[in-house]
Image (tube, rainbow, N blue to C red):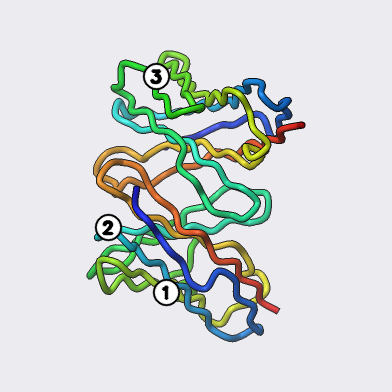
Amino acid sequence: AQKITQTQPGMFVQEKEAVTLDCTYDTSDPSYGLFWYKQPSSGEMIFLIYQGSYDQQNATEGRYSLNFQKARKSANLVISASQLGDSAMYFCAMRAPSGSARQLTFGSGTQLTVLP
Amino acid sequence: GAVVSQHPSRVICKSGTSVKIECRSLDFQATTMFWYRQFPKKSLMLMATSNEGSKATYEQGVEKDKFLINHASLTLSTLTVTSAHPEDSSFYICSVGAHTDTQYFGPGTRLTVL
């Protein structure tokens, strides 16, 4: 079974600073995908970044980067130059093993607050 | 990525009534859609996988007779909460699996049962 762990229920960061949101995962499948989603107070889930288990390089998307450490089974999200609009709930998720219709397992989330 | 809509965005109903929530994939033909439920300040919990033209696959503990799913076309899946009760009040959100592994989510439906 897959498991995603986010140990930080809440994080604070000063505007314009960088912040790292932690995510560890557990799976016995060699092929998997890791995702980060942002959920503002409106409720919509916004896709941020994806990392495949066989990807050689860490994924980056604008101000978002994923610090993928396969041996440690961690996939931390780094947000650079935080903005007030980054305040939201952030979820780490993992795709179920191949052949299972691409279901996602979510972590418990981290509430990020960006301070002015 | 795929654009997904949900309707309604918010619904309030009386206990005992049924509520239908629509999930539409606007720019992508989705053979598979997913329905999630989220309680306040909690994570998303997968309820079921909706398969176009066939029966939905429900997660353990989810009552299929309570949460009816119909995926009649490649762009529309519906979730009907039958005989809703206050404990069914929640945020329901659907997603579409696009060409890659990424899932794109609808804006969600907030259900309140009085």
Q: Where, by quadrant of the figure, is residue A84 drawn?
A: top right
The reply to whether the C-beta atoms of the residues labelled 2 and 3 are less than 8 Å apart is no
Q: Secondary structure at mark 1?
A: strand
Label 1 sits on residue:
B68
Residue A51 on image: x %, y % = 38, 28
Mark 1 surroundings within 10 Å by alpha-carbon count, few (fewer than 14), some (14 through 19), many (20 or more): some
Q: Secondary structure at mark 2?
A: loop
Number of callouts in the render?
3
Q: Is B106 above or below relative to A5?
A: below
Label 2 sits on residue:
B28
Residue at 67% over, 55% down:
B40
- Residue that extends furthest to the top in the rendered view of this protein: A71
Residue at 38% over, 47% down:
B103
Label 3 sits on residue:
A58
User: Is residue B60 at least partly visible in the picture?
Assistant: no
Residue A104 on image: x %, y % = 41, 44
Residue at 61% over, 48% down:
A40
Q: Is B82 above or below relative to A34?
A: below
Name the kind of residue labelled 2 in the image. Answer: Phe
Q: CA distance from mark 1 to mark 2?
A: 23 Å
The reply to whether the C-beta atoms of the residues labelled 1 and 3 are less than 8 Å apart is no
Could you tell me which quadrant the C terminus of chain B lies in?
Answer: bottom right
Q: CA distance from mark 2 to mark 3?
A: 28 Å
**Mark 1 or 3, which is nearer the eye?**
3
Residue A27 on image: x %, y % = 40, 29
Q: CA distance from mark 1 to mark 3?
A: 41 Å
Q: Is A41 above or below relative to B5?
A: above
Depth order, front residue of B19/A45? A45
Q: Secondary structure at mark 3?
A: loop
Depth order, front residue of A22/A64? A64
**Label 2 marks which chain's residue?**
B
User: Is residue A100 at least partly visible in the picture?
Assistant: yes
